[in-house]
Amino acid sequence: MLAYATVGSNDLERAKGFYDALMPVIGFAPMMEHGSGGRIYAGKGTMFAVVAPFDGAPATSGNGTMIGFMLEEREQVDRFHAAALELGGSDEGAPGPRGPAEAQAYMAYVRDPDGNKICAFKFG
C-alpha cells in the first residue's frame, strides 16, 4: 500500500489553492501544513502533499513520473478531471476506457499548474 506521495511546486500558494479545491473531489482533506510552506492532505489511508523541494533547488515535474488515485466510481474520475481543468490544470487524457477490455480500466490524466502528472482511475 502506498503511504504517501508528494509533488513539488515553485508557487506554493497557487499550488495549495489548486489542491485545496481539487482534493475534496476525491475525499481528501488538508491534514497539516508542511515545513516547506506546502500542505499535506489525507484521505483513504494515504497522504498526498505539495511541497517545496528539500534541497532548495527549483521544483520540476519528473518525466515519466505520475501519481495515480484509485477511486471508487467512474463518476469520481470524471469529476476529478473536470475540476482539475477548471482549477487551471491541463488535460493529458480525457476520462474513458484504457487498455484491454478485460482490465475494465477507466482513467483520466491531468497536469497540475506546475506540470506534475496526476491520474484518477477506477478498475471494474
Image (spheres, grey):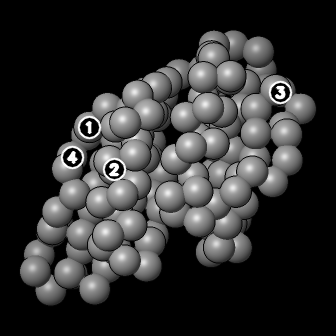
The answer to whether the residues at label 3 and label 4 have Cβ atoms under 8 Å apart is: no
Q: Is residue 111 visible?
A: no
The answer to whether the residues at label 1 and label 2 have Cβ atoms under 8 Å apart is: yes
- Tell me the residue that label 1 is attached to: 91
Which secondary structure, mark 3? loop
Indicate which label's residue lies in the foreground, 2 or 3: 2
Indicate which label's residue lies in the foreground, 1 or 3: 1
Which secondary structure, mark 4? strand
Residue reaching furthest right?
35
Q: Could you tell me residue 101's position as x and y percent?
A: 10, 80
Question: Disc 2 residue type?
Answer: His
Q: Quadrant of the C terminus?
A: bottom left
Q: Could you tell me residue 49's position as x and y percent?
A: 69, 44
Residue 29, placed above or below residue 76: above
Q: Residues within 10 Å of mark 3 (few under 14, many from 20)?
A: few
Q: Can you tell which quarter of the image residue 27 is in?
A: bottom right
Q: Nearer the viewer, residue 25 or 91?
A: 25
Write the residue at 89% across / 32% down. Answer: 35
Q: Nearer the viewer, residue 110 or 88?
A: 88
Which secondary structure, mark 2? helix
Residue 61, placed above or below residue 2: above
Indicate which label's residue lies in the foreground, 2 or 4: 2
- In space, the residues marked 3 and 4 are separated at their CA atoms by 31 Å
Numbered badge on residue 36? 3
Write the residue at 52% across / 63% down. Answer: 26
Q: Residues within 10 Å of mark 4 (few under 14, many from 20)?
A: few
Of the numbered discs 2 and 3, the one sitting upstream in the chain is: 3
Numbered badge on residue 81? 2
Q: Could you tell me residue 84's position as x and y percent?
A: 40, 42
Residue 62, placed above or below residue 120: above
Of the numbered discs 1 and 2, the one sitting upstream in the chain is: 2
- Tell me the residue that label 4 is attached to: 93
